[in-house]
Image: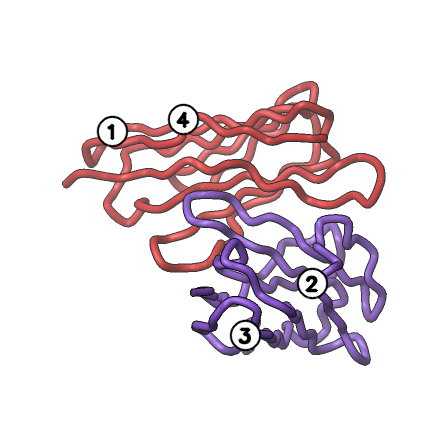
Protein backbone atom coordinates (compact mmCIF):
# COMPACT_ATOMS: atom_id res chain seq x y z
CA UNK A 1 0.00 0.00 0.00
CA UNK A 2 1.31 3.43 -0.92
CA UNK A 3 2.14 5.80 1.89
CA UNK A 4 1.40 9.49 2.15
CA UNK A 5 2.62 11.26 -0.95
CA UNK A 6 3.80 14.86 -0.95
CA UNK A 7 5.09 17.14 -3.67
CA UNK A 8 7.29 18.86 -4.31
CA UNK A 9 10.04 17.47 -2.08
CA UNK A 10 12.04 20.68 -2.23
CA UNK A 11 11.16 24.25 -3.08
CA UNK A 12 13.28 27.38 -3.15
CA UNK A 13 11.51 30.69 -3.66
CA UNK A 14 12.15 34.36 -3.10
CA UNK A 15 10.28 36.18 -0.38
CA UNK A 16 6.90 37.61 -1.34
CA UNK A 17 6.39 34.82 -3.90
CA UNK A 18 3.54 32.31 -3.58
CA UNK A 19 4.07 28.59 -3.03
CA UNK A 20 1.81 25.56 -2.83
CA UNK A 21 2.26 22.09 -1.39
CA UNK A 22 0.23 19.03 -2.29
CA UNK A 23 -0.60 15.96 -0.22
CA UNK A 24 -2.23 12.66 -1.12
CA UNK A 25 -3.09 10.73 2.06
CA UNK A 26 -3.36 6.99 2.49
CA UNK A 27 -6.56 5.68 0.96
CA UNK A 28 -9.38 5.51 3.46
CA UNK A 29 -7.80 7.84 5.99
CA UNK A 30 -10.36 10.39 7.11
CA UNK A 31 -8.05 12.59 9.14
CA UNK A 32 -5.39 14.71 7.45
CA UNK A 33 -2.84 16.93 9.18
CA UNK A 34 -0.48 19.63 7.97
CA UNK A 35 2.50 20.26 10.24
CA UNK A 36 5.44 22.65 10.08
CA UNK A 37 8.75 21.46 11.46
CA UNK A 38 11.60 23.85 12.08
CA UNK A 39 15.14 22.54 12.43
CA UNK A 40 15.69 20.82 15.75
CA UNK A 41 12.07 21.08 16.83
CA UNK A 42 9.01 18.89 16.89
CA UNK A 43 6.23 19.12 14.32
CA UNK A 44 3.77 21.94 14.96
CA UNK A 45 0.20 21.44 13.83
CA UNK A 46 -1.03 23.98 11.28
CA UNK A 47 -4.39 22.48 10.38
CA UNK A 48 -6.32 19.25 10.78
CA UNK A 49 -9.11 17.96 8.55
CA UNK A 50 -11.79 15.43 9.36
CA UNK A 51 -12.87 14.42 5.87
CA UNK A 52 -13.29 17.76 4.08
CA UNK A 53 -13.92 19.81 7.21
CA UNK A 54 -11.15 21.84 8.83
CA UNK A 55 -11.66 21.14 12.53
CA UNK A 56 -8.52 22.76 13.94
CA UNK A 57 -6.77 25.63 12.20
CA UNK A 58 -5.95 27.72 15.24
CA UNK A 59 -2.19 27.69 14.46
CA UNK A 60 -2.59 28.55 10.77
CA UNK A 61 -1.45 32.14 10.00
CA UNK A 62 -4.58 32.98 8.10
CA UNK A 63 -3.30 36.25 6.67
CA UNK A 64 -0.94 34.37 4.38
CA UNK A 65 -1.68 30.65 4.67
CA UNK A 66 -4.64 28.81 3.23
CA UNK A 67 -5.53 25.16 2.87
CA UNK A 68 -8.18 23.05 1.29
CA UNK A 69 -9.14 19.41 1.12
CA UNK A 70 -11.48 18.87 -1.76
CA UNK A 71 -13.73 15.81 -1.67
CA UNK A 72 -12.06 14.76 1.56
CA UNK A 73 -9.02 13.23 -0.15
CA UNK A 74 -6.10 15.29 -1.49
CA UNK A 75 -5.10 18.50 0.21
CA UNK A 76 -3.23 21.64 -0.76
CA UNK A 77 -1.47 24.10 1.53
CA UNK A 78 -0.66 27.52 0.12
CA UNK A 79 1.46 30.42 1.32
CA UNK A 80 1.04 33.83 -0.26
CA UNK A 81 3.19 35.82 0.10
CA UNK A 82 6.05 33.81 1.61
CA UNK A 83 8.30 35.34 4.24
CA UNK A 84 11.83 34.40 5.28
CA UNK A 85 10.50 32.89 8.50
CA UNK A 86 8.40 30.41 6.56
CA UNK A 87 11.51 28.37 5.71
CA UNK A 88 10.85 24.94 7.24
CA UNK A 89 9.79 21.40 6.39
CA UNK A 90 6.06 21.07 5.78
CA UNK A 91 4.79 17.63 6.69
CA UNK A 92 1.49 16.07 5.77
CA UNK A 93 0.16 13.16 7.80
CA UNK A 94 -2.98 11.06 7.70
CA UNK A 95 -4.73 8.63 10.00
CA UNK A 96 -7.89 6.55 10.04
CA UNK A 97 -9.29 8.82 12.73
CA UNK A 98 -8.15 11.10 15.53
CA UNK A 99 -7.30 8.20 17.84
CA UNK A 100 -5.20 6.25 15.34
CA UNK A 101 -1.50 6.47 14.57
CA UNK A 102 -0.39 9.14 12.15
CA UNK A 103 1.42 8.25 8.94
CA UNK A 104 3.71 11.02 7.75
CA UNK A 105 4.72 11.87 4.23
CA UNK A 106 8.36 12.68 3.32
CA UNK A 107 7.70 16.41 3.66
CA UNK A 108 8.45 19.45 1.54
CA UNK A 109 11.55 21.40 2.47
CA UNK A 110 10.84 25.07 1.78
CA UNK A 111 13.62 27.63 1.58
CA UNK A 112 12.64 31.29 1.28
CA UNK A 113 15.47 33.60 0.21
CA UNK B 1 -1.04 27.11 26.47
CA UNK B 2 -0.36 23.44 26.80
CA UNK B 3 3.26 22.42 26.49
CA UNK B 4 4.96 19.08 26.15
CA UNK B 5 8.59 19.02 27.15
CA UNK B 6 11.11 16.26 26.68
CA UNK B 7 14.37 15.66 28.45
CA UNK B 8 17.14 15.33 27.69
CA UNK B 9 17.39 17.35 24.50
CA UNK B 10 20.42 15.35 23.37
CA UNK B 11 21.94 12.05 24.47
CA UNK B 12 25.12 10.39 23.31
CA UNK B 13 25.61 6.77 24.39
CA UNK B 14 28.04 3.99 23.66
CA UNK B 15 26.55 1.11 21.75
CA UNK B 16 25.17 -1.37 24.26
CA UNK B 17 24.29 1.24 26.88
CA UNK B 18 20.70 1.96 27.86
CA UNK B 19 18.82 5.15 26.98
CA UNK B 20 15.75 6.85 28.44
CA UNK B 21 13.81 9.91 27.31
CA UNK B 22 11.12 11.55 29.41
CA UNK B 23 8.02 13.40 28.22
CA UNK B 24 6.19 15.81 30.51
CA UNK B 25 2.92 17.63 29.87
CA UNK B 26 1.59 20.65 31.71
CA UNK B 27 -1.92 19.18 31.53
CA UNK B 28 -3.55 15.75 31.64
CA UNK B 29 -3.46 13.88 28.35
CA UNK B 30 -6.05 11.64 26.76
CA UNK B 31 -3.42 9.45 25.14
CA UNK B 32 0.17 9.70 24.00
CA UNK B 33 1.97 8.54 20.89
CA UNK B 34 5.68 8.05 20.32
CA UNK B 35 7.48 8.65 17.03
CA UNK B 36 11.02 8.17 15.75
CA UNK B 37 12.56 10.44 13.15
CA UNK B 38 15.81 9.41 11.50
CA UNK B 39 18.14 12.17 10.30
CA UNK B 40 16.69 13.60 7.09
CA UNK B 41 13.56 11.50 7.42
CA UNK B 42 10.00 11.91 8.60
CA UNK B 43 8.40 10.83 11.89
CA UNK B 44 7.48 7.15 12.05
CA UNK B 45 4.91 5.89 14.55
CA UNK B 46 6.21 3.61 17.29
CA UNK B 47 3.39 3.11 19.79
CA UNK B 48 0.33 4.58 21.49
CA UNK B 49 -0.46 4.56 25.21
CA UNK B 50 -3.98 5.20 26.45
CA UNK B 51 -4.45 3.89 29.99
CA UNK B 52 -3.13 5.36 33.20
CA UNK B 53 0.02 3.48 34.28
CA UNK B 54 0.17 1.54 31.02
CA UNK B 55 3.43 -0.20 30.08
CA UNK B 56 4.12 -1.56 26.61
CA UNK B 57 7.18 -3.30 25.22
CA UNK B 58 8.52 -3.64 21.70
CA UNK B 59 11.65 -5.81 21.71
CA UNK B 60 14.28 -3.56 23.34
CA UNK B 61 11.90 -0.58 23.74
CA UNK B 62 9.74 -0.07 26.84
CA UNK B 63 7.10 2.65 26.98
CA UNK B 64 5.32 3.89 30.09
CA UNK B 65 2.39 6.22 30.68
CA UNK B 66 2.26 7.90 34.08
CA UNK B 67 -0.50 7.30 36.60
CA UNK B 68 -1.66 10.91 36.28
CA UNK B 69 -1.46 10.73 32.46
CA UNK B 70 0.78 13.80 32.40
CA UNK B 71 4.10 12.11 31.70
CA UNK B 72 5.57 9.25 29.74
CA UNK B 73 8.92 7.63 29.11
CA UNK B 74 10.69 5.58 26.48
CA UNK B 75 13.51 3.28 27.54
CA UNK B 76 15.81 1.49 25.11
CA UNK B 77 17.87 -1.42 26.44
CA UNK B 78 21.28 -2.12 24.92
CA UNK B 79 21.23 0.55 22.24
CA UNK B 80 22.32 -0.24 18.70
CA UNK B 81 23.51 2.09 15.94
CA UNK B 82 20.13 1.61 14.25
CA UNK B 83 18.50 3.40 17.20
CA UNK B 84 20.01 6.73 16.09
CA UNK B 85 17.42 9.44 15.54
CA UNK B 86 15.14 11.87 17.33
CA UNK B 87 12.36 10.50 19.50
CA UNK B 88 9.19 12.56 19.86
CA UNK B 89 6.21 12.10 22.10
CA UNK B 90 2.85 13.55 21.02
CA UNK B 91 0.17 14.05 23.63
CA UNK B 92 -3.49 14.53 22.80
CA UNK B 93 -5.47 17.11 24.71
CA UNK B 94 -8.54 16.09 26.68
CA UNK B 95 -10.54 19.14 25.67
CA UNK B 96 -10.98 21.71 22.95
CA UNK B 97 -10.03 20.39 19.54
CA UNK B 98 -8.29 17.31 21.01
CA UNK B 99 -5.22 18.00 18.93
CA UNK B 100 -1.84 16.36 19.39
CA UNK B 101 0.99 18.45 20.80
CA UNK B 102 4.43 17.18 19.85
CA UNK B 103 7.21 17.30 22.38
CA UNK B 104 10.52 19.01 21.84
CA UNK B 105 12.22 15.70 21.02
CA UNK B 106 15.30 13.86 22.26
CA UNK B 107 18.10 13.39 19.77
CA UNK B 108 19.96 10.12 20.30
CA UNK B 109 23.43 9.39 18.99
CA UNK B 110 24.91 5.94 19.42
CA UNK B 111 28.69 5.60 19.28
CA UNK B 112 29.95 2.27 17.94
Viewer-proximal residue among A50 and A47: A47
Q: Residue A61, percent across and down?
A: 70, 55
Q: Which chain is purple?
A: A
**Which of the numbered marks, if any, corresponds to residue B17?**
1
* Residue pictured at 55% horizontal, 60% vertical: A83
Judging by the rendered image, the residue that carries numbered circle 2 is A64
Q: Are marks 3 and 4 on the same chain?
A: no
| Secondary structure under the numbered disc 3 in the rendered image | strand
Quadrant hosting residue B95 = top right
| Secondary structure under the numbered disc 2 in the rendered image | loop
Q: Which chain is red?
A: B
For the C terminus of chain A, which image quadrant? bottom left
Q: Are marks 3 and 1 on the same chain?
A: no
Judging by the rendered image, the residue that carries numbered circle 4 is B8
Q: Are marks 3 and 2 on the same chain?
A: yes
Residue depth check, mark 3 versus mark 2: number of the one nearer the observer = 2
* Residue pictured at 69% horizontal, 78% vertical: A74
| Secondary structure under the numbered disc 4 in the rendered image | loop
| Label 1 vs 4, first from the N-terminus | 4
Q: Chain of mark 1?
A: B
- In the rendered view, tell whether residue B19 sits above or below residue A91: above
Residue depth check, mark 1 versus mark 2: number of the one nearer the observer = 2
Q: Give the CA distance from mark 2 to mark 4.
A: 35 Å
Q: Give the CA distance from mark 1 to mark 4.
A: 16 Å
Q: Give the CA distance from mark 1 to mark 2.
A: 47 Å
Q: Chain of mark 2?
A: A
* Residue pictured at 42% horizontal, 30% vertical: B75
For the N terminus of chain A, which image quadrant? bottom right
Whether tag 3 and tag 1 are in contact, CB under 8 A, the answer is no
Q: Give the CA distance from mark 3 to mark 4.
A: 32 Å
Amino acid sequence: EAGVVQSPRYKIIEKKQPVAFWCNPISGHNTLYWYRQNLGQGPELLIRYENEEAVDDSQLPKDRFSAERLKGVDSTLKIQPAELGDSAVYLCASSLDLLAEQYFGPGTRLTVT
Amino acid sequence: GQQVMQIPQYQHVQEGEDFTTYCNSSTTLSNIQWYKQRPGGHPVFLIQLVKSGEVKKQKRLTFQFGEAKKNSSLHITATQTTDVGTYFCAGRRTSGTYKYIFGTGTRLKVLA
